[in-house]
Image (spheres, rainbow, N blue to C red):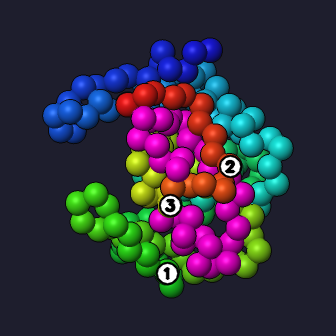
Amino acid sequence: MNLKEKIRVIEDFPVKGISFKDITTILTDPEAFDYGISEMIKAFGDVDYDVIVAPEARGFIIGAPMALRQHKGFVPIRKPGKLPAETLTFTYELEYGADELQVHVDAITPGLKVLVVDDLLATGGTVKAVKDMVQKLGGEVVGMGFLIELTGLKAREMLQGIRVESIVQYEF
């Protein structure tokens, strides 16, 4: 199956100059969705990990079914105010400003092997923040997986030393 053919590309969304890669067309096609999750799992078939960590919201769509199929735990990374127990709050820089993410402090324990997944790797800012959060709690990031990667933005450069896999690539 050619997963790239299943992705809807919407130009100038959400703002002019952005070429948005819409995965809802994959999600509404059970065979494509199953194939995408299977390919993500296959990409890390040789990696030993304990838990999958994913940022909201579309990372949940990829990470939760992967974790379930692999009989692994799933840890959600949320925007502030969404998690009920004690959290670690992490502030990170964006191109124009800053943002925050939170994780339950008891979700990642020292020595835990973590696979980070998301739907899209663009600039890498969010997943670098997730990596830093995992490491701050004592976890070890053993890989990062993405359904789509925008290779022209060169996010892999900021993730050096970490295995990065993507299923579908676009220059931009």
Label 1 Cα neighbours within 10 Å, binned few <14 / some 14-19 / many ≥20: some
Real-space CA distance between mark 1 and mark 3, rounded to the nearest whole angstrom: 18 Å
Q: Please, what secondary structure does the residue beneath circle 1 have?
A: strand
Count of residue discs: 3
Label 3, on which residue? 128
Q: Where the N terminus falls, by quadrant?
A: top right
Residue at image position (66%, 37%) is 40
Horizontal placement of 163 versus 126: left or right?
right
Q: Give residue 51's quadrant in the image.
A: bottom right
Residue 67 highlighted magenta (yes or no)? no
Q: Earlier in the sequence, mark 2 or mark 1?
A: 1
Label 2, on which residue? 163
User: Which residue appears farthest toward the bottom when viewing the image?
Assistant: 86
Q: In the displayed structure, would residue 139 be above or below residue 161? A: below
Q: Give residue 35's quadrant in the image.
A: top right
Q: Are marks 2 and 3 in contact (CB under 8 Å)?
A: no
Residue at image position (62%, 73%) is 135
Q: Please, what secondary structure does the residue beneath circle 2 have?
A: loop
Find residue 70 and report its horizontal and vertical position in percent. Answer: 76, 47
Q: Which label is found at residue 87?
A: 1
Kind of residue sitting beneath label 2: Arg
The residue lying toward the viewer, choosing from 169 and 101, is 169
Residue at image position (44%, 23%) is 7
Kind of residue sitting beneath label 3: Lys
